[in-house]
């Protein structure tokens, strides 16, 4: 049996970002400032950690200064995490306290999230703490225009790291900031110069806050940052912007929801519109249940359902936030309202 089976699961940070956006520089800084961290690098990545930090070890792992461990993801992520855990338990490597997974610059984060969330062995020992995405201030606009992978990486992020601001004109940085806020309203933007940042900027980004040892729904959901959508008529003239295909919006349903109707609506979205559903988060009031339920999904990947001990505030309505591509907010709002059996929806605007 695992000696640490009763301990809190170890936090995992997924570090993503488009090619050349500064992941390597950030990772080198984090290796120096976050001791007892295991760094997992995708085998197709171009990460080259500072050679002065490396000490050779037998096998696919290297010991880094400060007691960190670096290894290459070989094949599936799950076996790599299992091997790391077993080596930690046996004392073959330092007892790392967190994991950072670095993806390739063109990687879709969804498969990695799927692997982390649906392997029961892994879930018992590790928890996803958050997704951190680096964005190049100099070339970010062009990358978002030309590569949908870059848009996905921004949409799924819990925290955005804006790099190379010292190389880009101030007006370019300001325009990019505004665009990132439109694409992902809830993700705070942190400026990073030469890869240097406070390590706390990448920690405690998910629903669970390890410092307070509590579920921080208000910070995680932040529905006030999203434009409301109503379950009204469809259609309308799209905005003449490149990002008009990407929309971030909220849906609020007043009446308690039927669990199976809601599951059917979300199943339709995740099964048939997965490529359009970049991300959603929600706290919902289910019929016949006194406690609220937190839901979260990225494309086809559904996070495990979380039941809260109590509502975080006096507002007991169901609140959803979405980031979608080529999917009308009114359609999503109507789908949720119709399938969940809600008596009415509240959106704050006239459809």
Image (cartoon, helix red, strand yellow):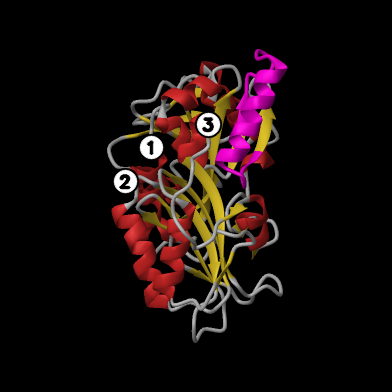
Residue indicated by mark 3: 241
Query: Residue 100, can we see it?
Result: no
Q: Quadrant of the N terminus?
A: bottom left
Q: Nearer the viewer, residue 265 or 284?
A: 265
Q: Quadrant of the C terminus?
A: bottom right
Relative image position of residue 320 (x, y in whole percent): 54, 61
SS state under label 1: loop
| Mark in the foreground, 3 or 2 | 3
Q: Could you say which disc has been placed on residue 108 in the image? A: 1
Left or right: 132, with 83 as reference point: right
| Mark in the foreground, 2 or 1 | 1
User: In this rendering, is residue 77 above or below 176?
Assistant: below
**Residue in view at x 59 percent, y 17 percent:** 138
Cα–Cα gap, marks 3 and 1 = 24 Å
Residue 168 belongs to the span the image colors magenta: yes
Cα–Cα gap, marks 2 and 1 = 20 Å
Residue indicated by mark 2: 79
Q: Residues within 10 Å of mark 3 (few under 14, many from 20)?
A: few
**Residue in view at x 54 percent, y 35 percent:** 133
Relative image position of residue 218 (x, y in whole percent): 67, 60
Which region is colored magenta? 161-188
First in sequence, mark 2 or 1: give its number.
2
Tell me where residue 75 sits by quadrant: top left
User: In this rendering, is residue 121 above or below 11?
Assistant: below
Relative image position of residue 105 (x, y in whole percent): 43, 26
Q: Residues within 10 Å of mark 1 (few under 14, many from 20)?
A: some
SS state under label 2: helix
Cα–Cα gap, marks 3 and 2 = 44 Å
């Amino acid at each position: 049996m695992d000696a640490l089976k009763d301990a809190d699961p170890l936090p995992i940070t997924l570090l993503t970002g488009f090619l050349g956006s500064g992941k390597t520089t950030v990772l080198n800084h984090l290796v120096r400032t976050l001791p007892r961290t295991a760094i997992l690098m995708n085998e197709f990545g171009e990460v080259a950690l500072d050679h002065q930090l490396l000490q050779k070890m037998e096998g696919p792992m290297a010991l880094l200064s400060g007691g960190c461990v670096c290894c290459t993801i070989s094949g599936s992520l799950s076996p790599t995490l299992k091997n790391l855990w077993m080596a930690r338990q046996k004392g073959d490597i330092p007892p790392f306290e967190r994991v950072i997974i670095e993806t390739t610059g063109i990687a879709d984060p969804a498969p990695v999230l799927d692997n982390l969330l649906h392997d029961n062995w892994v879930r018992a020992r590790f928890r996803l703490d958050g997704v951190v995405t680096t964005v190049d201030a100099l070339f970010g606009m062009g990358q978002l225009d030309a590569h949908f992978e870059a848009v996905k990486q921004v949409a799924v992020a819990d925290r955005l790291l804006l790099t190379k601001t010292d190389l880009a004109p101030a007006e370019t940085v300001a325009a990019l900031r505004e665009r990132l806020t439109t694409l992902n309203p809830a993700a705070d933007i942190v400026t990073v110069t030469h890869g240097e940042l406070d390590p706390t900027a990448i920690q405690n980004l998910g629903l669970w806050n390890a410092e307070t040892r509590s579920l921080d729904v208000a910070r995680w959901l932040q529905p006030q940052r999203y434009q409301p959508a109503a379950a009204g008529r469809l259609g309308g003239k799209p905005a003449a912007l490149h990002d008009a295909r990407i929309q971030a919006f909220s849906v609020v349903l007043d009446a308690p929801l039927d669990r199976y109707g809601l599951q059917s609506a979300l199943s339709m979205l995740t099964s048939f519109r997965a490529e359009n559903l970049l991300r959603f988060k929600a706290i919902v009031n289910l019929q016949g249940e006194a406690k609220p339920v937190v839901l979260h999904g990225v494309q086809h990947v559904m996070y495990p359902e979380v039941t809260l001990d109590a509502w975080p505030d006096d507002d007991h309505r169901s609140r959803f936030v979405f980031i979608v591509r080529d999917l009308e907010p009114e359609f999503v709002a109507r789908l949720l309202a119709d399938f969940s059996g809600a008596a009415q929806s509240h959106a704050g605007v006239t459809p």
